[in-house]
Image (cartoon, coloured by chain):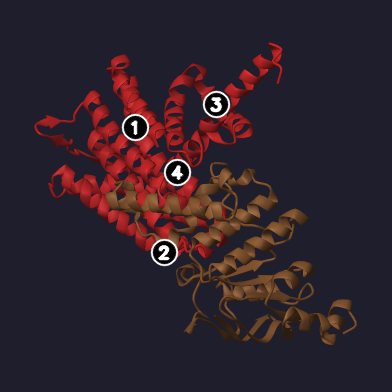
């Protein structure tokens, strides 16, 4: 357990250290996005990596959080914090209601159903023009403020977002190392044995689906209040797939993996700019190579590479074992 | 005491089980034997709530449990092991057994996320009790290993430790000796007796006749979905109908 605390503190230090290196400009903005994406990937990993249930509709929950927050603050002049809480509660309840029928499905069917859910939400954002502003988006969303500090620039937003992300990470770590975390993994490993041991797989799946939606909604609210402008294009199917990719590249059933995956996939397009129009090809190739040679994701893949290198140097050095 | 009364199971036009009735007395080891396709595993799946029978009832200590789903039965004290061991491969040996205590612990998602003091206390109890059951099954030294790294035999003992952690009044074992070598089968026999001595009623489906005749107090013989015979090991060995069924003369 102590090792867990050390790892977490290390992450906190890294998060605090980054603004010293990147304290302004575009890269800091990218780091803000890494934080939001880390929260979303983490939320999905609880469902996909731990409980083994796919969702291709995560961008929908993210968008709902953003739009509920955006609409409540612009049309109803609510305080952004209150709007965020209402958004989180609304999305959690919605996920509960939808989760019961939808999570009876397994595998490809569940993927299709969640995909459909995401698309329906996306269509609503586009078509409910009176409330959402339609395809041209919703602007003028107020910033969050706390004790006189208004979160209106990238540096403040960085600390705001990463504060939330670190709390989500801490809570998720607690969860996965508890009886609930074991129960989630047991459903993934053998649902029939889990049920025989008294794990109510059906209810637990719905609960974790709702929790995942709740974290995504909070990320959505944060996104809306930091960007001050939202449009449906950010919450489409492509983004849901990107989130699944982050989780798989980072490592299924690894909280830290989600953060690595989110960081890599958020920064990669920026790093690949030198390839200009071919960046999408390089991106695709990287994904293929990653899944072929690091099927366990970065968190398992990197240590494996290191230990292989170590083994090699030992052999070359004429080790006796 | 487990009473199975008039269980019938049809799959389409096939009658897998036809009006099966028997009683497993408290503290007994009851064996269910029969040739392949006799309906033994189907019977287990019905009793443990994985299948819903066409008709008939299952009564555990006077309470009708016929229509309860599998996940509700653990807290009633009914638990099972599987023919092809069903371990939680991504977890450690200890975590597997800790999961066995799921139905006897109650911290919810929020308590676990917030590390509430009562949750931490519960977690400690779960851990120490799980260690106790690993020790009971003689695999305490494997606690921190990944379950997927165990040999088939050790996996079998882990499955039993996990089932004991549920706190069963009755344990159903589906071919526990399958895939074990002689030494392991011997250890299994004494472990099953040890389980019985803690007051747990044991029902087992088994092909290893030597083991069945050795440890069972009572034996039920199924053939082609019907109950063919019932009695003590000695009675069963001398029963002409049983001999005929096994030698294929029926």
Residue nearer the viewer, A271 or A159: A159
User: If the image is split into quadrants, where does the C terminus of chain B sit?
Assistant: bottom right
Question: What chain letter is assigned to the residue under label 3?
Answer: A
Q: Secondary structure at mark 4?
A: helix
Question: What chain letter is assigned to the residue under label 1?
Answer: A
User: Where is A195 relative to B88, above or below?
Assistant: below
Q: State which tag comes first along the sequence, 4 or 3.
A: 4
Q: In the picture, which chain is red?
A: A
Q: In the picture, which chain is brown?
A: B
Q: Which residue is mark 4?
A: A45
Task: Give how far across and how far down residue A144 sits, in percent.
Answer: 17, 37
How many labels were placed on the picture? 4
Query: Which quadrant of the structure image shows residue B32?
Result: bottom right
Q: State which tag comes first along the sequence, 2 or 3.
A: 2
Q: Which residue is mark 2?
A: A100
Q: Which mark is residue A302?
A: 3
Q: Which residue is at a point 69% across and 52% down the rendered structure image?
A: B153
Q: Which mark is residue A35?
A: 1
Q: Secondary structure at mark 1?
A: helix
Question: What chain letter is assigned to the residue under label 4?
Answer: A
Residue with the most extreme left position:
A148
């Amino acid at each position: 357990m102590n090792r867990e605390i050390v790892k977490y503190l290390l992450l906190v230090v890294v998060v605090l250290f980054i603004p010293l290196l990147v304290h302004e400009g575009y890269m800091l903005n990218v780091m803000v996005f890494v934080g939001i994406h880390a929260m979303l990937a983490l939320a999905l990993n609880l469902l996909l990596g731990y409980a083994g249930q796919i969702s291709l509709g995560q961008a929908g929950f993210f968008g709902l959080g953003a739009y509920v927050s955006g609409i409540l603050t612009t049309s109803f002049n609510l305080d952004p914090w209150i709007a965020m809480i209402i958004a989180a509660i609304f999305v959690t309840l919605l996920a509960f209601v939808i989760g019961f029928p939808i999570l009876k499905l397994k595998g490809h069917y569940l993927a299709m159903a969640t995909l459909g859910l995401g698309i329906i939400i996306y269509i609503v954002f586009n078509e409910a023009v009176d409330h959402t502003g339609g395809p041209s988006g919703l602007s003028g969303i107020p910033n969050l403020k706390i004790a006189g500090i208004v979160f209106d620039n990238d540096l403040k937003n960085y600390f705001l977002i990463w504060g939330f992300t670190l709390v989500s990470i801490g809570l998720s770590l607690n969860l996965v190392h508890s009886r609930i975390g074991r129960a989630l993994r047991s459903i993934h490993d053998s649902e029939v044995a889990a049920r025989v041991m008294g794990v109510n797989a059906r209810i637990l799946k719905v609960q974790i689906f709702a929790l995942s939606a709740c974290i995504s909604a909070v990320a959505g609210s944060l996104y809306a209040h930091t960007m001050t402008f939202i449009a449906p294009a950010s919450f489409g199917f492509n983004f849901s797939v990107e989130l699944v990719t982050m989780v798989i590249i980072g490592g299924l059933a690894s909280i830290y993996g989600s953060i690595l995956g989110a960081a890599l996939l958020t920064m990669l397009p920026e790093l690949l700019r030198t390839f200009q129009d071919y960046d999408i090809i390089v991106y695709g190739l990287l994904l293929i190579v990653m899944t072929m040679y690091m099927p366990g994701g970065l968190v398992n893949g990197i240590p494996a590479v290191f230990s292989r290198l170590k083994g090699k140097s030992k052999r070359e050095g004429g080790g006796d074992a | 005491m487990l009473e199975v009364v008039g269980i019938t199971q049809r799959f389409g036009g096939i009658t897998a089980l036809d009006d099966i009735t028997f009683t497993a007395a408290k503290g007994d080891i009851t064996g269910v034997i029969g040739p392949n396709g006799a309906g033994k595993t189907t019977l287990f799946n019905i009793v443990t709530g994985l299948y819903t029978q066409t008709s008939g009832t299952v009564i555990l200590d006077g309470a009708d449990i016929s229509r309860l789903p599998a996940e509700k039965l653990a807290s009633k004290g009914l638990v099972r092991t599987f023919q092809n061991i069903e371990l939680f491969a991504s977890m450690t040996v200890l975590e597997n057994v800790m999961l066995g205590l799921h139905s006897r612990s109650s911290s919810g998602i929020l308590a676990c996320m917030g590390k509430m003091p009562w949750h931490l206390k519960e977690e400690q109890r779960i851990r120490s009790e799980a260690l106790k059951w690993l020790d009971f099954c003689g695999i305490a030294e494997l606690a921190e290993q990944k379950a997927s790294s165990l040999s088939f035999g050790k996996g079998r003992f882990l499955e039993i430790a996990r089932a004991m952690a549920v706190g069963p009044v009755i344990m159903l074992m589906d071919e526990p000796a399958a895939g074990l070598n002689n030494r392991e089968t011997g250890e299994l026999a004494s472990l099953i007796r040890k389980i019985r001595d803690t007051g747990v009623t044991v029902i087992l489906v088994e092909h290893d006749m030597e083991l069945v005749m050795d440890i069972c107090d009572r034996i039920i013989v199924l053939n082609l979905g019907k109950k063919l015979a019932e009695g003590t090991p000695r009675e069963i060995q001398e029963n002409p109908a049983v001999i005929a069924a096994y030698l294929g003369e029926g």
